[in-house]
Structures are given as structure tokens and as C-alpha cells.
Amino acid sequence: MKRRETITLEDVAQAASVSPATVSRFINQPASVRPEKRTRIQDAIEQLGYVPNGAARALASRRTRMIGAIMPSLDNMLFGGPLEAFQKEIGSAGYTVAVACSEYDDQQEQVHVRNFLESGVDGLLLVGAQRDSQVYRQIEQQGIPYVLTWVSSDNRTDHCVGFDNAAAAEHLVDYLVSLGHRRFGMISGFIAHNDRAQARLKGVRSALTRHGLSLEDDQLLQRPFDPDAGRDAFHILMSAPNPPTVIVCGSEPHAYGALFEARDMDFNVPGDVSVTGFDDMWLASQTSPPLTTVRTPRGKMGRQAARHLLAKLQGERIAAPRPLETTLVVRKSTAAPRKGELSPGARSALMLKYAQW
Amino acid sequence: MKRRETITLEDVAQAASVSPATVSRFINQPASVRPEKRTRIQDAIEQLGYVPNGAARALASRRTRMIGAIMPSLDNMLFGGPLEAFQKEIGSAGYTVAVACSEYDDQQEQVHVRNFLESGVDGLLLVGAQRDSQVYRQIEQQGIPYVLTWVSSDNRTDHCVGFDNAAAAEHLVDYLVSLGHRRFGMISGFIAHNDRAQARLKGVRSALTRHGLSLEDDQLLQRPFDPDAGRDAFHILMSAPNPPTVIVCGSEPHAYGALFEARDMDFNVPGDVSVTGFDDMWLASQTSPPLTTVRTPRGKMGRQAARHLLAKLQGERIAAPRPLETTLVVRKSTAAPRKGELSPGARSALMLKYAQW
DNA sequence: CGTGATCTTGAAAGCGCTTTCATATTTGCA
DNA sequence: TGCAAATATGAAAGCGCTTTCAAGATCACG
């Protein structure tokens, strides 16, 4: 299929016997063109099958109507939802969303930011606030607005659309302590370059400290965000001589993995050990037992991020967004800690394990 | 933050005492510039913090280096993975991916295609092959390449990167029939405007026909792709007077829903009823019982789609991609059909249900 | 060294659109 | 009906870059 000789705005102008300027106006603010010409132009456009050239518009108007979004991943349900919500909201304002994945790697993210800046995006959607300050400098040098999601406070609060990960984690731990738990284990994502994971860990630790408890280093495992990694970590944590009575997971996939592994190891949840998640994805209410977790308002966050960015794009002077609410959702995977021994099934499973060694 | 007066290629040229043309060459094919000048230019670029203007490049070179991707949804794990794979592969060739969601709605898809065309994308990634022919006409009129994923054959086979949904479904049903099943129920996505769902249904039907069986209209339920809808459908299907011995799900979320509902209804899977999925997402191996399903090579598909598109973008004359292999993964959710009655638990659950009415 | 072949370079012409700015044209109102 | 005010239009100058094209620099080799 050969590219037919391009039909330009000028062709339309000629066909409609008006000047190019008028056609341009027709496209951008039809109201400023006399109705009679309007129909002439409309007809010409349809007749010729004219399609405006985005690059030319962008060059002349100095706006691309494109927003760059850089997500850590799209391969789990975590970022897809908010991204879709964001796209929907901002798309209805005439913007296009370009995406890239950083794979939780700050170097990759940096490259993507740079690329987006070169593409001339009008705005940027990022996850988390922690990154090389040089990145922020670059963005600000281009003078484009950006929004940071999944976090609420930082030294850039006015760009943050999200929630307070630390507070949510604290709240969760308070609840667990009130249940009677004293020995905690935690499965976290890698905290380097991940301020969400850091905040959650920090929240856990500070709540623990507040109650005179602590999280020993060997009770904290960092793992990639997938269920298998969660399984593995759970197994290790629970194979210790005197295993925790509760496993707090910094992200939900870890919790699913923990639950699966618990099942395979014949652990009773919450009888032998309580397990908590973080995010409340759809599966959380369907596992057995259903997962106690923290609900994060992801769809709302995506939409709010879009609105916030739109406001900035229109040059509005707006206040820093208010942090979104998280909710502790108590289901059946948490209960008071076991008294003394693990249940027979779990014990024999563990014995078996050691016997094999 | 004020936008500093833009630094253009010309500024760089001046700073490096060369012509703009040379700077342009430096950027696009450094090898054609003498080393000595190369360093001068490089220095100037860094010193000035020059960032090329994508729109101008696009306008002058008539290429945006942007690929438009339109997915039905990002909010389930189904499309995120392949999209991420696609982005990674095509990103490493210097392309940017813009995404939009059609929400399984062909009108929305049409609008997004149009928008992408106006944005001047260099290529298009779509899901499925069935759409208004006018859409294809528009795309072809712009002369840009496109690839259709999740399907393998169509009257546009040379654009398809995917697998044979119908054949995979047939294969699955053959297996179920060989197990002894005669009474089938199916939970499908909405088949209107969804050729993947259509093909799967068609595959089920033709295998059934081949074995002298059939799928009655009231044994086929169409539902949105989410577990709750699957639950609902499963409940209805299994509440019939003489319920099916196997429920075939056209998509995996439905199967998860079916499994959850079975658990809640005290149905034994596969004792009372077998359940199958389609796609083999990560959860499939972790449900109880683990799900028998069809594995679709989604990551591979994303990468191949990228490579195929790249080849076309480079004007290579390439053969139609070969359909990718799907695999029947037999786990524990399928077995020979129950003999006679449902298990006591399931029966009482059903009785209870009717009693309530 | 000379000379044709090969590399590098710069000047200049766009790419297709938006956006002043100045010039019609229409409108409101006396 | 007339005149200032408001509105619609067109001419033309870019937006920042790529890409001929032709000329200048460099090279290989006899």
C-alpha cells in the first residue's frame, strides 16, 4: 500500500476556497469561523479524507498533547488499573498516553524520562517520588508538569497523588499487635529505589517500635513482586526455629504466595500464622482464607492524577492534592497468635523438611 | 517553573562552530561526522543541555518513532504482559509506545485508531482482526503498517501474530470428551465484536459436533471478563435441573470465578463438575484444585508482534507470521464426569438455594 | 605530486501547521 | 442610515529539524 500523496491543510483550503489560516481555525476553534464556510470546509475535509498532521501541529503550537507514563511494570494487576483510569480520564481531554516500563529499575526509568522529554510530551506520570534529583532538574528544565503517584508526602508534596504508605502500614501493625502478635515476619519488595516499599517497611517498624517490639533483620526478606517469590520467602521465614506468628507482606502478590505456600506446607492460616497483604486486589477476597489487607484507592488515584495533571497543563495554580484514604480490610487470614506449638500438620511438614536434609 | 528559552540545534551549531546540518548528522549518524567535530558538538550539547525537539524531527523526517497500541483493557493481567513485552522489544529499537484502551468496544477502538492516525504514529498494534473495514481503509490510506494480535488466521493473515483460538478450544473439548463428558456448559466473553471469543466458541461447538454432541443455547452464557461474572454464570449453569458435567470457560477470569463459586456452593471440582480455563495466567496453577487450561504464549506473542512490526517499518518484505503454539495444560480441575447425582454437599447447597425461593 | 574518487560540510529549501498582525466585513446602536 | 466596535479573514512569518545539492576537503594510488 503506497502512501498517497499527503493531503494537507492547504489542499483543504483550496478546495473550500478559503485561506489555510481559516481551515486551521476551523479545526481548533470552529466557533470563530462563519457557519457558511464551516460547512464548505467540513465538506472539503471529508471529501479529501484529510487527516491533520500531528507533528506539524505540535511543532507550530508547541504542544504535543501527549503524556508520558512510566510504570514499574504492566505485568501485574497493580499498575494496569490506575493507568487505564488515568488514560481514560486524560484521554477524554484530548491527550494521548505513551507508556514505558522501568521494571523497577531507576536507570531504565531515567532513560525513559529522557526519551519522553525528547518526544516532547506535555506532561509526565511517574510512580514514586524517590529518584535522582537530576531527573527532576531535567524535567523542570523542559518546563513540563508531572505527577508522582503511589505516594503522598515527600519534599515534592504538591506533585504527589497517592496515599500514605507508612501510615497505612502502621495502622495495620497496630491491629495485629492488638490481636496479640509479638513476633513479626515481613516479606517486602526490594526497598532500594522504591520509596513505596521503604515507606511500608518504615511504617511497620515504627509501629512495632511504638509497641516496644521490633523486626529483626532476619525476619525481613526482600523479594521481587511475584507470588512464587512470596512462597519462597514464606517458607524460609516459617522454617526458622521459632517462627513468627504473623507474616506481613509489603505487596499483595507476596501474600498470595505466602497463602499458597502455607497451604502446601499444611500450615493453618490464621491458626498457625496470620498473613496480611497490601493493596487489596481482586483476588484478596477470594483466597482461602480471604486475605486481611490494606485497600489502596488505585482507580481513584489514576483519575485524580489525570485531573491534577490537566489542571497543571492548563496553567491552573492548584493546591497540593490531599492524600487519598486507605482502608484496613480485615478478613479471615488474621487472628490471635497461636499458643505455643504449631498445629500437628504444620509440624510434621516441617519435620519432614528437616528430615530430607 | 518557567520554560527557559528553548535551546535549538542551531544554538548547538553555533556553540560548536559548525553548521546546523552537521549537528543534525551528528545526532542521526555520528559516523558521518569527523571525530574532531564530534567532540566539539558533543561538548556543546552537554554544555547547553540541548534536547532535540521530537515534533520538529517528526515533521522534517516524516516519522514519529511512535507506535500506537490499542488494547481492550489493561486492568487484568491478560494484556499487560504482552504489551510490556512488546514495548520492551520495540522500545529497544527506538520506538515509543502509546496506549489506549477500547474497553472491548469497537466504537471506542475506532476513535482511538483515528486519534493515533492523527498523532502520526508509525505503526499500530491491535487486538483481534474483526473490525469495520473502513478502519482498515483509513489505516492503509495513511500507509502505515499494523499488526493484529491474539488471532492467527483471517483474511489478513499476513498481519496476524497470534494463535489459533478455535483449534485450541477444539483440542480442549476433545480431551474433555475423551474423559467421558457429554453435557457441556460454557461461560464466554461477549462474542459480538470479539473474534477471539467467537473463535473459541466456534472451536468448542465444532469439536462437540464432531462427537455428535452440542452446546444448547441455555448452556452458553456471555459475561464480562471478570471473576464475579464467572461466579454468577457458574451459579446459573449449575442450578439447572440437570446441570452440565463440565464448564468450559472462554477466559480465565471466568474460570476463577467458577472455581470460587463452586467452593462456596460446596461443589466438588472435579468430582461434581469439571472446570477449564483458557490462557493459563499465573493463578491457574495455584487455585484449588489447580486449573486445567490452555496455555497461550502471550509474552512470545508480544515480542513477535514487535519484531514483525519492526520488519514492516523497515520496509522488509516478510512472510506472514506462523501461528504460535498453544498447549493444553491438564491439572486437577478436570476428571471423568460424575456418575449420577451430585455430591451431598452440593445437593444440599442447591436445595437450600431453592428453599430460599 | 597530480588526479579522480570518496568523505565531509554548509546553504537553503522545505515538512504542515499555528499564530500574529493587518485588513476586510459585519454588527450594534444612535 | 451612519459610524465605532466587534468579528471574521488572509498574508506571511515562523516552529526546529532533516535532507537534498553542490562545493570543499581528503584520500588512494600511479
Image (cartoon, coloured by chain):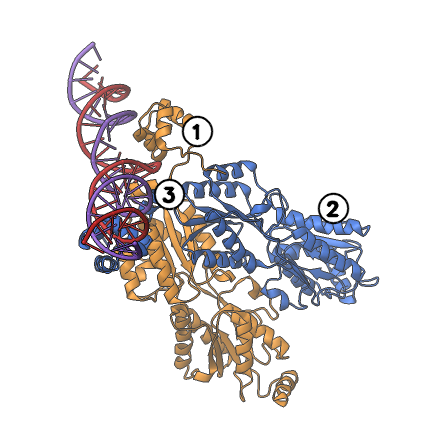
Chain colours: A orange, B blue, C red, D purple
Image location of residue A93, percent across then percent down: 39, 44
Q: Nearer the viewer, mark 1 or mark 2?
A: 1
Task: Measure the alpha-carbon separation of dots 1 and 3.
Answer: 20 Å
Chain letter, disc 3 residue: B
Quadrant assignment, res B115: top left
The amino acid pointed to by label 3 is Arg
Question: From what the image shows, is residue D17 above or below residue B253?
Answer: above
Image location of residue A117, percent across then percent down: 32, 54
Question: From what the image shows, is residue B357 above or below residue A178?
Answer: above
Image location of residue A102, percent across then percent down: 42, 63
Image location of residue A154, percent across then percent down: 32, 66
The amino acid pointed to by label 1 is Leu
Is disc 3 in contact with disc 2, using a CB cutoff of under 8 Å? no
The 10 Å Cα crowd at callout 1, few under 14, some 14 to 19, many 20 or more, is some
Chain letter, disc 1 residue: A
Q: Quadrant of the C terminus of chain B?
A: bottom right
Task: Measure the alpha-carbon separation of dots 3 and 2.
Answer: 52 Å
Helix, strand or loop at label 3? It is loop
Identify the disc placed on residue B217. Answer: 2
Identify the disc placed on residue B62. Answer: 3
Q: Are marks 1 and 3 on the same chain?
A: no
The 10 Å Cα crowd at callout 2, few under 14, some 14 to 19, many 20 or more, is few
Q: Quick one: label 3 or label 2, which is nearer the N terminus?
A: 3
Helix, strand or loop at label 2? It is helix
Q: Residue at x 66, y 48 (%)?
A: B199
Residue highlighted by disc 1: A48
